[in-house]
Image (cartoon, helix red, strand yellow):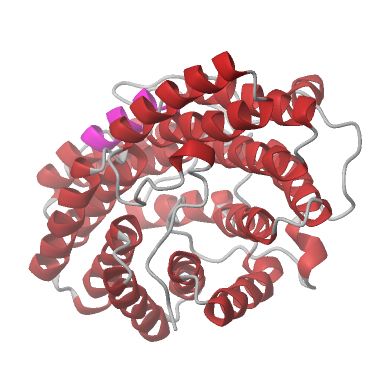
Amino acid sequence: MQTKALAPEYQGALTKMSVNASLTDVLAEGVRHLKQAELSGSQEEVARSGLAVAEAHRRLGQVQEADRAWKASYRAARSAGATGAMAWALWSGGTLARQRGSLRLAFRLLGLAAELGKRGGDVVARGYSLAGLAETGRIQGDYATVATLHEQLLAEARARGEARHTVWALEGIAQIHRNTGQLDSALEMFEEAAVLAGDADDRRGRAWALRGIADIVSLRDGATERALGLLAEAEVTCREMKLSSALAYNHKMRANVLFRAGRYEEAREVYEQALTEFRAMTEPRGEALAALGLVKARARLGRDRAATAADLDELRGRLSRIGLLNAREMVERAYAELGVEPAAEHEGAGGRREGLPAADGAAGEPAATQRRAAEPAEEPAAAHPRAAGPGTGSAAPHEEAPVR
């Protein structure tokens, strides 16, 4: 029996907030309760309220504010000796790191969060942290390693009747199937996720599922208008809930659908829109993927072949720095598809090109920065999803995956 969707990251005085609450409302309530908690002197309540503030900032694309908020939540939880609250703060920090393209830091923080969730007896925090590790591995393209963990988390979510977590796991497995060419099973899972999310009143989960369905019906069936209709429906939710990242990925998919239909000028415009949105929220993975689509659309519209090759060179290096295992294959396919040769011999060559802005800084972070961000002295052995199952990395074709 599946329950209505809940938002366990809204804690303390915010537990009654709906999973569908506008993020601006969540932020306002979180800040209000955080101030009250600070006046009361309850460090655990400071940590719990601060978590909602951190998550609202993150999902609104306010990266610096989110970074400060999760670290403050962690410090308050640590001072209160609240192990579960520490786990949730690290989960938020790890999720933010993944959103920013710092995958090594994401693995570290999420691994710490999973360990603290286990130590503190917070099953949900541990489950969300393991899901975060699985999602990070999936985004990286390491499907062979994380597929088993996805299946395990799906089984656990079904057994506990956690609708939101079930929807997330279904969408993750569907994304793996889509990226490995199993389009029929991927569509079935996205459709199941959409129904379940609708029944559970999980609007965010349903919006991501509709986006997945749109991708498949466009790719497999060439059903352009149906795909655009599904994306338009999902966009309403993204705008009403202020889901900045989900909206940018929705626009990226809209551009993909238009590109597949040969509507290159429209695709170019929407890729540019998505690129601007990703840059505004400092999301380098989405930015690079939108930029790759933009390069391809411009090439189809007659862009100079040498300039196209140089843009692809720059993107190959950028995607590799983010840590996507299949970055080279993505770009190699684009070289072949567009009929151009690499303009530089070494990976990562190429600077800022016309209309194709370089990423804001490297995706990874120095080890010293990682240590300062994580703060706990000990690091669990299973800080990487490779601990969850066997397998080596996969370089299967990639499409971006939903971010919780």
Query: Residue 152 versus residue 288: which sits nearer the camera?
Result: 152
Across and down, in percent, residue 52 comes to 48, 35
Q: Position of residue 248 (x, y in %)?
A: 30, 41
Q: In the image, is 366 to the left or to the right of 237?
A: right
Q: Is residue 193 above or below residue 268?
A: below
Q: Nearer the viewer, residue 266 or 73?
A: 73
Percent across and percent down for residue 160 are: 57, 76
Q: Is residue 274 magenta?
A: yes
Q: Residue at x 39, y 63 (%)?
A: 5
Region rendered in magenta = 272-283
- Please state if 112 lies on the left or on the right of 316 as rendered: right
Which residue does the image show at 45% across and 52% down from the upper left? Answer: 7
Q: Give the side of residue 86 with respect to residue 210, left or right.
A: right
Q: Quadrant of the N terminus?
A: bottom left
Give the residue displayed 20% in from the left and 41% down from the top. Answer: 239
Residue 180: within the magenta? no
How many marks on residues?
0
Which picture quadrant has residue 363? top right
Q: Nearer the viewer, residue 35 or 135?
A: 35
Residue occupying the far top of the picture: 39
Q: Is residue 296 visible?
A: no
Q: Is residue 172 above or below residue 107?
A: below
Q: Which quadrant of the view contains residue 39?
A: top right
Q: Indicate the position of residue 36 as horizontal and vertical percent values.
A: 49, 20
Main SS, magenta region, reads helix
In this rendering, the answer to whether 388 lies above or below 118 is below
- Residue visible at 79% across and 47% down in the picture: 116
Q: Nearer the viewer, residue 373 or 289?
A: 373
Residue 259 seen in the figure: yes
